[in-house]
Every structure is written in C-alpha cells, then in structure tokens.
Amino acid sequence: MHELAITQGVVEAISHRIGEGRVVAVRLQIGKSSGVVADSVRFCFGPVTEGTILEGARLDIDEPVGQCCCRTCGEVFEPDPRFALCACGSADVEVRSGQELRILSVEVV
C-alpha cells in the first residue's frame, strides 16, 4: 500500500510549507488513472496526521476520470481506471489527463 507513503509525503510537504499555522482542511486531486487509491489515502490521513499541524483537519479529494485520445482512430474517451483501451480495440492511446496527484488547497487558521 504505497498510499501510506504518499499520504506521509503530502503531510510533510504541507507541514514544511505552512510552518506554525493549524491546518483545518486539505483538498487533493487524485486522478482515477494515477494508480493511487483515494479511499486508501482517506484511510491513512487520520493516523498520519496525528501529532502534526494537520491533526483533525478535513480531507476532501477530487477524483477526475481523465481523458485519452486513440492514436489509431482519433477517438477521445474517458478511460477505464484500470485500462487505457479504446473502444476500437487499440491500446495505442495518449493519456491526456487523469493521472494527477496534486495538493489543490490548504485551509489554515
């Protein structure tokens, strides 16, 4: 479960950037094709934030589906999170979005 390490990285990045403030909310963007399971990040967030400036903070996660373009037929489509496969059967696709993992916002008091 690499989501534990990812969640720790997010918490460390925010803690380093914020410094002394108290974080009350964090908003992440985790694309459906990123290979990161948003529910696992939610599960890890509470334990990872214990004893940090993020303890008790609310976690919101946006999960964009993403978009692919088939190099064979030109079709633009929303990929299945597990496979970037066009309806024409081609796996020669350009993944345009859906692989994001971003900290969108942090609310501090």
Image (tube, rainbow, N blue to C red):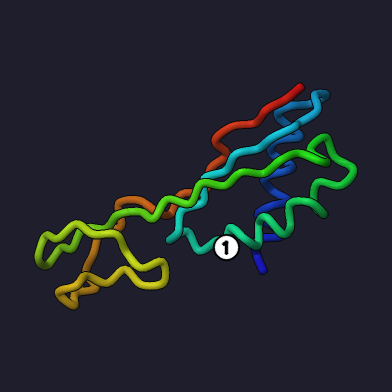
Q: Residue most toward the left? A: 73
Q: Is residue 40 left or right of residue 94?
A: right
Q: Is residue 30 above or below residue 36?
A: above
> Residue, x 77% and y 21% (percent of image)?
109
Quadrant where the N terminus sits is: bottom right
Q: Is residue 91 left or right of residue 46?
A: left
Tell me residue 78's x, y (percent). 29, 59
Tell me residue 75's x, y (percent). 14, 60
Q: Is residue 76 left or right of residue 102?
A: left
Q: Residue most toward the bottom? A: 89
Task: Classify mark 1: helix, strand or loop.
Answer: loop
Residue hosting label 1: 37
When asked about the image quadrant of residue 85, the answer is bottom left
> Residue, x 74% and y 32% (percent of image)?
24
Badge 1 density bin: few <14, some 14–19, many ≥20, Cα 10 Å: some
Q: Is residue 36 above or below residue 8?
A: below
Tell me residue 41's x, y (percent). 66, 56
Q: Is residue 80 left or right of residue 16?
A: left
When asked about the image quadrant of residue 28, the answer is top right
